[in-house]
Image (cartoon, grey):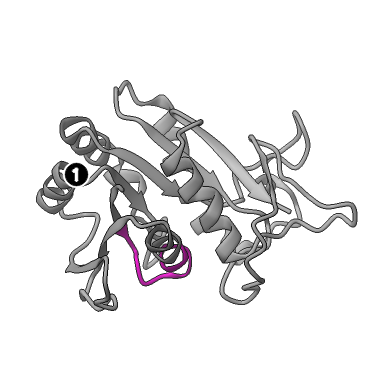
Amino acid sequence: MAIITVFGATGYAGGHITDEALRRGHEVIAVNRTGSAEARPGVTPVAGSLDDEALVRDLAAKSDVLVVAVRGTVDGEPFLLPLVPALLAAAAEGDARIGVVGGAGSLHATDGGPRLIDSPDFPEAYKAEAGSHAQALGALRDADTAAHWFYVSPAAEFGAWVPGERTGVFRLGGDVLLSDADGKSFISGADYAIAFVDEIDEPAHRQTRFTVAY
């Protein structure tokens, strides 16, 4: 059993990861700004935010894994990127791993091709959020740190508007977008969470990004 702190535990990805972790017998410290996560067996709700350095250090010391399932931007301004150094320092000091719920925009459309965010068809409305997450991934990769982190990009279609079902069948990839035979790139919230908690249970990706899709 692991103790897993989930920042953004009431969001789409954070909620699915919390549910999957509980299904496997882990303990979850569920963090959001209001502390409104459901108090149920195995869950300890905590009011707080990733930008509270003292809280992050305290939870890193208590946890085996810190899950970061938060937006890259808040009110149009970068949120996650400036927090990367303190997050890495807290994790290294507390000997906790970091798992980041990433975005698909930093994935490459093809091997050696442009990133999705750089393609002409990428929606303008999502560029700030996707760009901020891409920068956070870059900061993780560039950091001189002993912290064990991993970053999981979902398929292009991922979110509460396309919830899908829990199948337990999916593919893992690296930096290139995964699509099915019909060209569709999709993963349900439940199956994304399975892949994410698989990495918590059996670490295979240290200081790297991987992606999951059908």
Residue 192 position, x and y percent, is: 57, 56
With respect to residue 112, does 127 lie above or below? below
Do we see residue 192 in this rendering? yes
Q: Quadrant of residue 15?
A: bottom left
Residue type for callout 1: Ala
**Residue at image point 44% right, 37% down:** 150
Q: Is residue 56 left or right of residue 171?
A: left
Residue 23 position, x and y percent, is: 43, 63
Residue farthest right in this picture: 182
Do we see residue 134 in this rendering? no
**Residue at image point 75% right, 56% down:** 185
Residue 17 position, x and y percent, is: 44, 60
Q: Which residues are magenta?
A: 6-16
Residue 10 is covered by the magenta coloring: yes
Q: Secondary structure at mark 1?
A: helix
- Residue situated in front as seen by the camera: 175 or 121: 175
- Residue situated in front as seen by the camera: 187 or 144: 187
Q: Which residue is mark 1?
A: 60
With respect to residue 110, does 5 lie above or below? below
